[in-house]
Image: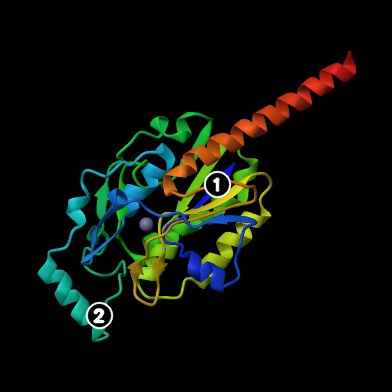
Amino acid sequence: MILLCMDGLDYQLSAKLKLHLPYEATPTIEKELCALLDNNYVPHTLHVWPSMFAGRPIRHPDIDKLIIHPIRAKGRATLHRLGINWGRKETQLRAYQKGIIYQRSVKPEETVFGEYPSFIYQIPGLVDNFLLGGTDDWYNYEHNVWRNLIRIADKLPYKLVAVYTRQPDHLGHRKRNPAVIYREGFMLAKQLEGDVMILSDHGCDYHTGNHTMNGYIGANFPFKAESIMDVKKIIEDRLKLNNSEVKVAAEAEIKREV
Ligand SMILES: [Zn+2]
């Protein structure tokens, strides 16, 4: 199974762009997976992703490092409203350090990835030295790796492959239209062999630059989900089903030989 993890993919925008997978859900995000961001209490990347794969809420213990002082946040919001924005470029002084590095909050072995031979790339909360923030160049580099890994994902010798990009979230926060990235994600998903899902931890509305309250689960096989934390069970049920299908086929083969 291949999981295209797209941070901040907003289901309302993907629907508007007529981008769909055969089966879809827009799960709610529990309050305990939210954090204060720019004076709003919204789903937080570092809480949602590990919880999704562990099937239980896992808050990141260091999230308070991110909280901007309310006066600074207010000043920044005023400047943004006046159209005074600033870009992040590698040439800017210490721009790279503007991000904050986070260590994982749970071991991948303690999530659904511990149940199967798995490969993961950059999942927040599951990998060490995850950089939140950073420059455009860094986001572009990370997204390129994501794209190249997806192109070979169905050839990799793993039962579960999960690759992550933050580009939809990044562009949303920067108030740039992320349609190109959305189209690319759905196109790549449809080109792959086998079971494929697109997952998002919350939307990021590029008109407001803010997180929205629902995630997105899309798949090329049927599933049921209400909460974002149902993702673990969806994966388990599907892989179990595949195993038993393979077993039935193998048994039929043996009977024929006899
Ligand atoms: Zn996120």
Q: Residue at x 37, y 75 (%)?
A: 175
Left or right position of 204 against 33: right
Q: In the picture, which quadrant includes the C terminus?
A: top right
Residue extending farthest to the bottom is 82
Q: Is residue 18 visible?
A: yes
**Nearer to me, 170 or 223:** 223
Residue contact at pointers 1 and 2, CB within 8 angstroms: no
Q: Is residue 159 visible?
A: no
Residue 157 image position (x, y, % from top left) = 61, 34
Residue extending farthest to the top is 258
Helix, strand or loop under label 1: loop
Helix, strand or loop under label 2: helix
Q: Residue at x 35, y 33 (%)?
A: 107
Q: Which residue is mark 2?
A: 80
Q: Which residue is mark 1?
A: 224
Here the colouring is: rainbow
**Ligand 1: quadrant of the figure:** bottom left
Residue 248 image position (x, y, % from top left) = 75, 25
- Identified by mark 1, the residue type is Lys
